[in-house]
Image (tube, rainbow, N blue to C red):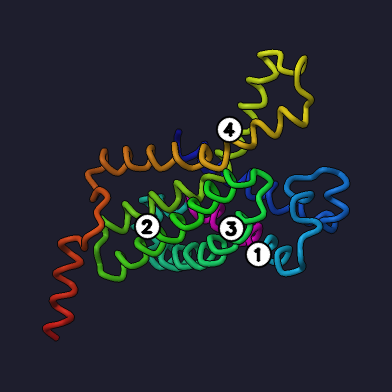
Amino acid sequence: MSWTVVTLLSLAISGYFVSQYATGTLEELAAKEVGLASTYAYRPFLVQAVFYIHIVSAGLALVLGPFQFLKAARRRYPAVHRWTGRTYAVAIAFAAPSGLVMAFYSSAAFVGLFGFGTLSVLWAWTTYRGYRAIRERDIASHQAWMIRSFALTFAAPTLRLWFGTLIGVQLLLGRTAEMSVDEITAVAYAAVPFLCWMPNIVVAEIMIRRRNLPGLRFSPSPSSRRAAAATAAA
C-alpha cells in the first residue's frame, strides 16, 4: 500500500471517526445506530469521557502519523518533524490508555477485551520505545519502532476495511437466508479486535527488514548500551 493511499485512508477515517460523534449526544447517536454510540451511550460518565478522549486523541495520531514518514520533510523541516512527532506521541499517551479502558466495555466481549486491550498495550509500548530510541540518538531503532507504532495506529482504517469485507463475504455467501443483518454484523465484528492490527504488525516487520532497520529485540541495542555507558562514565 503506497504512502498516498495510507495518507488518504488515514485522513478520511480520522475525519469521519471524529465528526460522526460531534453531531449529537451518545444517546441521540445510539438511537440512530451511529458507530459505537450504542455501546457507550449508557455507560458511566467517566467511561463516556474516556470514549471521547480516545476518539479525539486517536484521530489526531492517525492524522499526524503518515507525515512523519516523509523523508523530504524530515530533511528540510527537522523542527517540524520533531514537534509533530512529539504531538503524535502525546496523542497516543492519551489514546492507548483510553483504548484499554474501552476494551473492557467492547461489544465483542472477551474477544474485544483481549484483542483491543492487547492493541492498546502494544501501541503504547512501541511508541514509548520509539521515543526512547530517538532520545538516545538511535535513529535506526527509532525508525523501526515508529513504523510499528503507526502500523498499530493504522488499525482504525484496517478495522473498517476488514469489517466491511467480512460483512460483504457473508452477504455474497447468502448468509441472509439463515441470519439477520444484525447477526451478520456481530459475526464480522467479532473477528476484528485481532484482525485489525495483527496483519499490520506483520507488514511492519517486513518493511523494517527490507529497510535493514533493527529487528525486534528485548535487550538494549548496541547504540543504547553505548549511550548508557557514556552517561555512566560522565
How far apart in space, not on screen, are marks 2 and 1 (Cα)? 29 Å
Tell me which amino acid carries mark 1.
Ile
Nearest to the observer: residue 170 or residue 73: 170
Q: Nearer the viewer, mark 2 or mark 1?
A: 1
Q: Which residue is mark 3?
A: 99
Q: Residues within 10 Å of mark 3 (few under 14, many from 20)?
A: many
The residue drawn where x is 64% and y is 43% is 108
Secondary structure under tag 2 reads helix
How far apart in space, not on screen, are marks 4 and 1 (Cα)? 24 Å
Q: Which residues are magenta?
A: 53-66
Q: Which residue is mark 1?
A: 53
Asked if residue 128 lies in the magenta stretch, the reply is no
> What is the chief secondary structure element of the magenta stretch?
helix
Q: Are marks 3 and 4 in contact (CB under 8 Å)?
A: no
Q: Position of residue 86 (x, y in %)?
A: 45, 68
Q: Earlier in the sequence, mark 2 or mark 1?
A: 1
Secondary structure under tag 1 reads helix
Q: Position of residue 43 (x, y in %)?
A: 77, 60
How far apart in space, not on screen, are marks 3 and 4 (Cα)? 19 Å
- Residue 162, labelled with which disc? 4
